[in-house]
Amino acid sequence: MKLSRTGMGSTKLNNIDEMYPGQSILLQTGQLVQYGAGLFGYNTIPLLVRRNVEKIIVETLNKYGCTEVLLPTLQPDTIWKNSGRYEHYTKDGTMLITESNKGTFCLAPTGEEAMLEFAREKLKSYKNLPVTFYQIGEKYRNEIRTRGYLLRGKSFPMLDAYSFDKDEEGMEKSYENVRKAFLEIFEQIGLKVIPIVADNGAMGGKKSEEFMLISEQGEDKILYNEETGVGLNTEILEKENYQEYLKQEYGIEDISNFKEIRTMELGHIFQLGTRYSEMMNGKYINKGGKEELYYMGCYGIGVSRTVAAIYEQSLIKDKKSGPCGFVLPEGIAPYMLQIIPKVEDEEKMKIAENIAERLTFMGMKTIIDDRENITIGAKIKDVKILGTPYMIVIGDKTQGDNLEIEDIKTGEKIQTTINDIVKVFIGKRLKV
């Protein structure tokens, strides 16, 4: 990729938001563009970070036997009235609706209704079960209190998955299957999440867990036992029978060693039971030829939240201990190497293009900073702004075929040549 094609100029960072410095840097440098409260556009690098997160989600869920589908986000109000949730969502102002001479339509804040409509036509017999459908698509919520940029927006990409089973035992197996998949997804992304005991709240059902990232930028407080790695949402303690509930569903008998910490929610999973099947007549024919209700589970990952968390966790600081950019994880970074040639020197540009061509052939993506009228010093600072893990400068000091690769995170410098550069990165090729 040539950086000039992104429209990115060299930006001086000022008044970085202390609470959300990572996303503040993205906005100041034009990598995120804000259209209104809770509404953002992505420039190419954060968009590719988002695509890499989505790729990990898709590949992992497929490995765990889930099936990808895609449902419309603009939906007729009838399916929401069928579930009984239309009045709730419109009364509290969460749902965005539009009226036309063809009827009233809703922008989906979540996907249970649409997925049940979809599944009912496909899963008519016990022979079709169990199934877990999932999709990654935009959701819309008219958040009155937008907060933390991508962490709580009005429009946001989300992974939502739904399992359909014949009975409670099957539902519990599907739940555990997706739970394992979620833990693997976050491990691959490089975010250490804690699955914690949560209240099902308005979703209903028997059991749920939130996937929390320890973070001062989070708006949730949890109780966490560092020794066992077990956590629980403080809302659980508001249940009248919380001690019995914790013991029965999670085997937790004593919470005296749990400490309160601040966290950011990135995912949530639920055992719904037959609640939505009852509301929307979701049934299949059992072995005996009789109708029975689906047992359902639902599972979500906030994709934009996860992208925001990656940037906030990847921050690096300058010598004055102020945030100055990022080093994105190698498994997530869209480009592994940023090449900074002296653009007015035709020979240096040819060397840059030669390196990019060699690495691209081996599956390694690179950025050539070909922007004119910007100093090499400013371009070096912009490597950190874009989060690229490695950098090569091809300037006046570059002699012959000799190159110096800098690891942005550690500052380590590796000496190599044009012919040997592929060997330096060959072990990293599969990570991008």
Image (cartoon, rainbow, N blue to C red):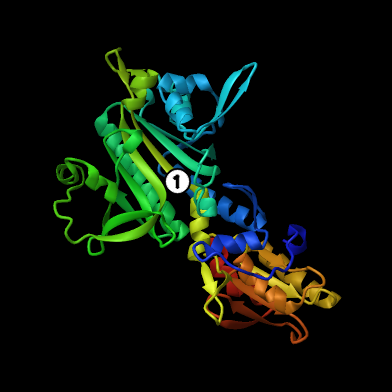
Residue 91: give x, y in percent of width and height.
46, 28
Left or right of 399 on screen, residue 127:
left
Residue 427 placement: quadrant: bottom right
Residue 334 placement: quadrant: bottom right
The foreground one among 158 and 38 is 38
Does residue 417 appear anywhere in the picture? yes
Residue 354 lies, with reference to residue 267, above or below; the image says below
Does residue 331 appear anywhere in the picture? no
Residue 382: give x, y in percent of width and height.
67, 70
Question: How many marks do you count on the picture?
Answer: 1
Secondary element at image label 1: strand
Furthest-top residue in this view: 289
Left or right of 238 on screen, residue 125:
right
Residue at 46% x, 39% y: name it: 160
Q: Where, quadrant-wise, is the C terminus in this rendering?
A: bottom right
Residue 421: give x, y in percent of width and height.
65, 75
Residue at 70% x, 72% y: name it: 339
Q: Kindly identify which residue carries mark 1.
A: 301
| Mark 1 closeness class: few <14, some 14–19, many ≥20 residues within 10 Å | many
Residue 211 lies, with reference to residue 387, above or below; the image says above
Left or right of 65 on screen, residue 37:
right
Residue at 18% x, 40% y: name it: 240
Q: The disc labelled 1 sits on which kind of residue?
A: Ile
The foreground one among 260 and 175 is 260
Left or right of 61 on screen, residue 31:
right
Residue 126: give x, y in percent of width and height.
34, 22
